[in-house]
Image: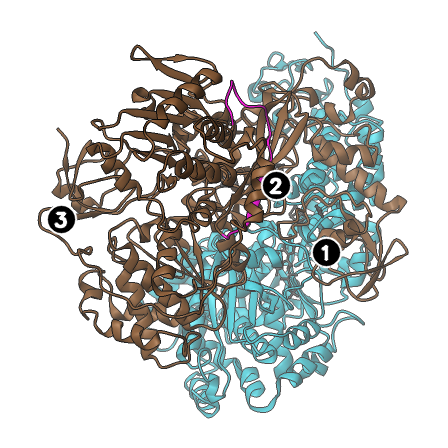
Amino acid sequence: MDLNELETLRTRITASRDKDKPCITVCGGTGCHAYGCLKVAQAFRDEVRRLGLSDKVAVRQTGCHGFCERGPIVVLQPKGIFYQRIQLADVPEVVSKTVIEGLVIERLLYAEPKTGARIVAERDVPFYKRQHRRIFGSNGHLDPTDIDDYLALDGYRALAKVLSEMAPADVIAEINSAGLRGRGGAGFPTGRKWEICRAAHGEVKYVICNADEGDPGAYMDRSLLEGNPHSVIEGMIIGAYAIGSHEGFVYVRNEYPLAVENVGIAVEAARKHGLLGKSILGSKFDFDIRIFKGAGAFVSGEETSLMSSIEGRRASPRQKPPFPAQSGLWGKPTNINNVETWANVPWIIRNGAKAYSQIGTQDSKGTKIFALVGKINNTGLVEVPMGMKLREIIFEIGGGIKGGKEFKAVQTGGPSGGCMPTELLDLPIDYASLAQAGSMMGSGGMIVMDEGTCMVDVARYFLHFTQEESCGKCVPCRVGTRQMAEILARITRGEGVESDVERLETLAKTVKAGSLCGLGQTAPNPVLTTLRYFRKEYDAHIKERRCPALVCKAFLAFDIDKRKCVGCLLCLKACPVKAVSGEIKKPHSIDQTLCIKCGACFEVCPPKVRAVTKTSGASAPERVLP
Amino acid sequence: MKITIDGRSIEAQGTKTVLEVAQDNGIYIPALCSHPRLAPYAACRLCVVSIKGKPGFQPSCNTYPAEGMEVVTDSEELRLQRVRTMELILSEHPNACLICSEKADCEDHKASIRKSAEVTGCVFCSSNRRCELQEIVVRLKVDSIPYSSVYRGFSVRRSDPFFIQDYNLCILCGRCVRICHEVRGAAAISFMFRGSQAVVGTMFDRSLMAAGCQFCGACVDVCPTGALAERVGRHEALPDAEAETVCPYCGVGCRLVVETLQGRIQAAKPAEGGVNRGQACVRGRFTLRDVVYSPSRIRRPMVKKDGKLVETSWEDALAFVAGKLKSYAGRACVVVSSQLGCEDLFVLDRFAREALGAGGAVPSLQPSILDGLGDLVKAHGLKTPHRASLADLPGSKAILVLGENVPVSHPVVWVEILEALRCGAKLLVASHKDDLLTRHASQSLKIRPGSEFYLLASLSKVLLESGSPQAGSGLKGLDGFKKSLEKLPASCLADTAGLQEEEVRRLAEALRCCGPIVLVFGQGLISMPWARENLAALWDLAVLTGARLLPLAEESDLFGAWLLARRKPSGAPSLETVLRAATTGEIKALYLAGPAPLPEKHGLEFLVVQDSFVNEACQGADAVLPAATFAEAEGHFVNLEGRVQKSEKVIEPVGEAKPDWWIASHLASRMGAEGFGYEDAGRIKEQLDKEGLLALQEEGEAGFVPVTAPSGGPERAAEYPMVLPGEYCPDYYRTLALCQASPDFKVLRNPRRLKIGPEDAAGAGLQDGAKARVESSSACAAGPGTARVKITGAS
Ligand SMILES: Cc1cc2nc3c(=O)[nH]c(=O)nc-3n(C[C@H](O)[C@H](O)[C@H](O)COP(=O)(O)O)c2cc1C
Ligand code: SF4
Ligand code: SF4
Ligand code: SF4
Ligand code: FES
């Protein structure tokens, strides 16, 4: 296929599609998968066929819409009616009422949590309203396994433009002036990276798409690959052209079967259409992509480690320099970018650097996709302009904290990001501000924590993670994270000593300054930021022997308020170790020497009574040793 | 380029790391994971330095100098970082030894040392006082650690031969894994798990043995801690002396540092520098001690009295032997081992000729590849093709290996071949087996045993026909060579060698590549009647392509023996002749200073064994004279490159053993021969030097020799349908088999096994582990020769 044929094909696809034809789009993202979207989609297809509407109504399984909290999500086009939490039983009704009769089913609409008002259109849902879904938006409109859908949405137009009008240097200049920075972690200017790789000596050069995404809770890269693989592929071809590479790899972890499958289908389709392979679009440029399935370790996402894994060796980072752009895969100059970085490229080329850089801040341009998770009402994937305040993301888009609780902290950047307190809620999200606050952009994880979260415990959790996920090569990371995790565990167990805080600080500094790769260099962040912003909690654990958030078991005490207890026997029956004693209709009591602090009594005590108390520290009853 | 280290302006090359530049200039930077033989790894993070213009710390072991670079190696900040890193290392390492409060007094009071099952502190560690950690701890002045110690609780692995692995002591510097992969190519060990669980181990946690370990000991030697420790030495105190010797086994002639305690050998370790560049093989590294102190050492002279050997004094023994031998002058022969030093060989040879009137001492390893080449030189008056040294290997572009399983027979040559492969050389192999060698080959041809001639000749033919310019064009004898090639039957390549022309063509292609070529060849090329034809074809290929020849001499002084033999006008008789003459009674006395397969029935009247070990021949001997081993006498050995190397005396002789030269010269003197008053080996060496006997001057013109097809070649014969390739067993010293000397070695290699293809085995009715009967067509099965055989199951 050459350039003209591409446009002819595009025209044919668009012409054959009736914009006003009703289309039932069912989200097929990973979140909705878990809610059973596959069955829902099939049910829609069956229902449409049963009613003999196959010609008049289309059913499309799309990529992730982002609002995973409310899955399975169904959007009825062309009106954009947004239904959520669709069950199999709802299917016939949706088809008969909404698709055929055009009526909106109130019950299936999204309700504003505060006011309870029902919202009809997807774009009016607050979760979406404040987003800027430049990269992620198409996900909801296309079937990732059908290249025609992508072509209908101007797909590969950027590539056509690059191949017909732009020299490699022009492409790099465009990316540079757009101000695109890497979305995979360190935020290195993408154009600069390409330039270095282009200038590097060597006939053979490689490009790699880093789709390892091992941060717990993060799934934007995976959703992009699942939902819009062609945008990533198009970005890679453009990048390869700019750099002078003819071979590319998508490194995607095997644990993401849908991503593996969809990107595989997309590569195959692109090849069939002459968008990959020899003489792409009739030009003199050859490029092809191979998919490499990684076996999921967090550290495999580190670029040198990833390349070592592709080479068939243990995924273990090596010291830089030389940087991959000089000597990467098999010693050849290699350009590696994150999935989202690649997906930004076609947009920039299509719309121009100027349009691109209109949103964002001074040094961070464009949008960024975050995986918003934790104690928040609307969890899901959100794409927002760089520079948006944390507050806006958490309280407007995210709909605030679950269960009406207080916000306590937000952690960005994956397991080695920092935890930021309420005072930093007005921090604009960009590379520099996050770094200054002791955190980082990372690949875009955002974990919201409420008042019921113990920050020492959070630090312990993350250090435990990095300790296990460190590759074990260099001393500071391997042993330092273990020691930090151990000290933190000790503090949460109530065995902390005052010198531990200083020890943690020293360790954190040593590990940060001494580690070989990014994992170790950033692993201490959760410790450093919790020490910086939540020092009081450490003191409470160590000096006052209590956990203010009532999380750390060692400090907890469950007791029964004799004045409130109605003697219902519920807690007595629930206690697994028979620590509760009492008779019916008489106040019960807990034997502190037997209690294992599982909290079963606390959970079962009826809300009307609330006689079981959970306390920590001074107010806790003394534990009498037998 | 110029860089500054701590304010000092220093001239640096770009190829050395900042750490190496600093070390070269006497600037100390602590470093644990780096090793001169290994690629930078940057894991211990002790070697951090500050570099102007770069943020944070940089590992100097992985940083290369750049013009104008300003490096600071010492500052409070750096010191703290290093101390804290060391504290972390120590928190995972039994550390009583390093930071014990009693340390200062410990040296004075400590009574017992290094001998525990589980290492908990220094006094029980085999590496105590040789531990690199200890050194750095002292320099960094670490005296306490603020963290809880973690004992990882691995069980100590002792089931493998030669060394034990106690990964509780391991600091994960990765040197062992890297040397096993990068240098030895064995890849037996790797990292397992990750994070704080990371540990060194084998795939599926198998034993080292099952994981393909060669027991070269390279990992043990680079381990900075006591994690890998040689089994024997770990129960002993530290050595108090050491001496450098030449490894007595194969022709590589590795330099070994032999450590001793109170005059007893403890361990032998490969010396840095020298041919072997810090490497050795399982034989040199782990078996010397067992060999020298073997229970089968002959300790005192013995003579036969009333049909029994009885111990006696040297005086009596010498008198007896000299007296007897005198009467057999002209009807006696001397057999020598080419694992003896040049001094010994020279004196024994003189003894044979001047005192016994024999043609000269006969080497026990025959035929030898060197003799084969020498014969061609003599026959055609040409110069031998270029000889290669080990150092030529890494720089070569193509290496063709024939007739030897190098990884087993000459592991240190293999190390250099692997280095060459890493530098981009092609390894070409023709073999009838699949082994480590063929696995690493860029091209490997499956060839029928014994038919290398056809491959070599065809290669030359293809290269000549291609018409491309050759290094050898214009040299003497080219036309004759071409003509002789044309005379070869065309069908032989496929019929006899089992090769396709296309395969040979591709191999030739690789040989045409620009760049140095080395032809490495061994016993397999000559252990058959048509050895001469093989060598001629090899010779021509070398001349044609300008390749260098690396003959894999099997014994430590084979080259020396060959050099000494050159001065004989007609040469000594072959071992086969000697043995036949002994059987028929043509000779009446035999003097064995080397192994010889003496037939049970022979016509000898007087047999003397001069050896270090009791062997089969002793039974029928009239006198047995205890000879010193290589460790007990000074001497010179000529390795396979022609390099003359001195081996020092390490210990006093075991029992009353005497150097071989001493015994021979005393006998000769007593027998009235002149000029045998040698008092020490130095004198002998002086004479060798004066006469230029060890100097290798190769004269004559370069040129081709004609080739002829082997007659009685490897074509299949009905009666003896199979060809049994002589598999040379390199595992012996003089008459002692290493598996006999060292129980650990026996676990590793047991030579009494016949390898046969599954189809042939089925045909012969053989199953794995069954006993086989081998009948040979060759009348004399002496030596490790290839033979046509019939194999059947033994009842
Ligand atoms: C421990 C660790 C894990 C990483 N994981 C990922 C990952 O999963 N995906 C990713 O794109 N980058 C990851 N990175 C960052 C990569 O090393 C690299 O910087 C990135 O792929 C470059 O792409 P970009 O310039 O487009 O951001 C990781 C880095 C570290 C240190
Ligand atoms: S910092 Fe951690 S993950 Fe990175 S190389 Fe060191 S041990 Fe491995
Ligand atoms: S002895 Fe040699 S082959 Fe075996 S593990 Fe050590 S380095 Fe590897
Ligand atoms: S066993 Fe020795 S050489 Fe190997 S990693 Fe451990 S400390 Fe290093
Ligand atoms: S010697 Fe440089 S990091 Fe170990």
Q: Distance between the residues labelled 1 and 2?
A: 23 Å
Q: What residue type is labelled 2?
A: Ala
Q: What residue type is labelled 3?
A: Pro
Report whether the residue tagged 2 is closer than 8 Å to ligand 3.
no
Q: Is residue B754 visible?
A: yes
Report whether the residue tagged 1 is closer than 8 Å to ligand 5.
no
Figure chain in brown? B
Which corner quadrant of the image does residue A219 belong to?
bottom right
| Nearer to the camera, B190 or B506 | B506
Q: How far apart are marks 2 and 3 (CA)?
A: 48 Å
Q: Quadrant of the C terminus of chain B?
A: top left
Q: Circle 2 sits on which residue?
A: B271
Q: Return the disc, 3 or 1, that comes first in the chain's sequence.
A: 1
* Image location of residue A81, percent across then percent down: 53, 69
Which corner quadrant of the image does residue A186 belong to?
bottom right
Which secondary structure lies at badge 1? Answer: loop
Magenta segment, which residues?
B641-658
Q: Chain A is drawn in which colour?
A: cyan
Q: How was this image coloured?
A: by chain
Q: On screen, A425 above or below A501?
A: below
Q: Circle 3 sits on which residue?
A: B721
Residue A263 placement, left or right of B145: left
| Nearer to the camera, B726 or A106 | B726
Q: On screen, B722 above or below B238?
A: below
* Image location of residue B501, percent across then percent down: 25, 70
* Image location of residue A300, percent across then percent down: 57, 53
Residue B719 placement, left or right of A439: left
Q: Quadrant of the N terminus of chain B?
A: bottom right
Q: Circle 1 sits on which residue?
A: B17
Q: Residues within 10 Å of mark 2 (few under 14, many from 20)?
A: many
